[in-house]
Image (tube, rainbow, N blue to C red):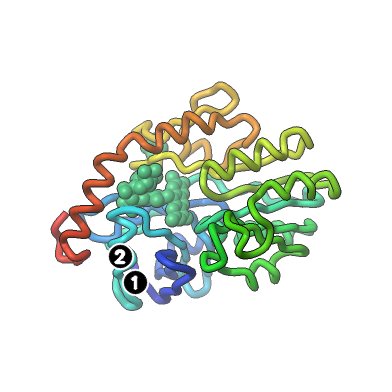
Amino acid sequence: MMYRIVAKKPLAHKETLFEVEAPEIAAKARPGQFLIVIPKEGGERVPLTICDYDARKGTVSFAFHEVGKSTKEMGTFEEGECLSNVTGPLGNPSEIKNFGRVLCVGGSIMIAPLLLQAKALKDAGNHVTTVLGCRSKEFLFMEDEAKARSDVVYVASDDGTVGEKGIAFLNELLRKERFDHCVVMGPVVMMKTVSEITKPFEIPTIVTLTPIMIDGMGMCGVCRVTVGGKMLFGCVDGPEFDGHQTNFDELIKRQRTMLPEERLSSILYGADGGCKCGRQ
Ligand SMILES: Cc1cc2nc3c(=O)[nH]c(=O)nc-3n(C[C@H](O)[C@H](O)[C@H](O)COP(=O)(O)OP(=O)(O)OC[C@H]3O[C@@H](n4cnc5c(N)ncnc54)[C@H](O)[C@@H]3O)c2cc1C
Ligand code: FES
């Protein structure tokens, strides 16, 4: 099977969207599910959330942020080139139904998959308010897509260079408007903050957890998360969980388990000139 990249779209600095030929995955994919991509033979398994699929064309899309060796390496692939392996769809699909008034909050690269869910929620009859969170103006992307898939769109940036400054404005919004359901996809710290904001308003809040994963199929146990005091597997029990019940601090700690090795691998890859010649 060849997983050919049919489109490569730069979203922001070091943030890219790939549309890849994978007809069997495209036929089954649903919002909220993820893929495991091996960019180059013998390479690492990279879990990435599905941000679009087209069963007719036989393609599936995902967006990635270059944070370490494997994602940097993926960024060097061009249209027409093939990824070594793409497995999926993995994990459980999002619950899509008419909740009423829905708040969708996306941060950083996870804005791309969030908008797939926003579209499905709007198609299901919900009134959708979307918040796009970014570090600063130059990292904002897909604003037009958000407007097309939502009834109302807000932008928030960490440094205030575009839209609201920080995510705290949500407190004010929730005091003024009623929401029946909230979906958050983004950095763990952001999902934790939004869950803390929605909790006193008693708005059910669903977060997409991204623990370190290996097989993505419930076999290795690496992706353990604690939700509601129970140990669950991110891959087969999630990746979506109740944000009000999630132990985010434990997740943050577990995500950093391999930090020294990841830093070294990234430095060595940089020293290689970032080539795709097969050296690890
Ligand atoms: C269900 C799920 C969905 C995800 N969706 C997206 C997405 O849509 N777009 C995106 O850019 N990123 C997504 N991620 C995170 C992405 O998998 C990591 O950024 C990537 O694996 C980093 O690999 P690296 O070699 O480039 O960086 P490394 O230097 O190896 O790691 C950098 C950091 O990424 C995390 N990470 C590393 N390896 C893994 C792994 N095997 N599984 C999970 N996290 C890891 C760790 O926190 C680590 O500190 C998702 C993760 C999960 C679990
Ligand atoms: S990634 Fe192995 S059990 Fe979830």
The three-letter code of the residue at mark 2 reads Leu
The residue pinned by badge 1 equals: 4
Residue 229's place in the image compared with 50, above or below, is: above
Query: As rendered, which of 74 and 96 lies closer to the eye?
Result: 74
- Label 1 crowd bin: few (<14), some (14–19), many (20+), radius 10 Å: many
Q: Quadrant of residue 23?
A: bottom left
Q: Where is residue 159 in the image (x, y as percent from the top left)?
A: 58, 57
What residue is at 47 percent from the left and 43 percent from the top? 210
Closer to the camera in the image, 212 or 81: 212
Q: Where is residue 237 in the image (x, y as percent from the top left)?
A: 52, 36
Q: Which is nearer the eye, 114 or 162?
A: 162
Apparent side of residue 100 relative to residue 59 in the rendered image (left or right): right
Q: What percent of the width, then of the height, locates residue 125?
A: 79, 59
Q: Looking at the rendering, in which quadrant would you find the N terminus?
A: bottom left
Which element carries disc 1, helix, strand or loop? strand
In the rendered image, which residue does mark 2 sit on? 83
The disc, 1 or 2, on the residue closer to the chain's N-terminal end is 1
Decide if residue 64 is on the left or right side of residue 134: left
Residue at 42% x, 32% y is 253
- Quadrant of the picture in which ligand 2 is shown: top left
Residue 226 in view (yes/no): yes
Distance Cα–Cα, label 1 vs label 2: 6 Å
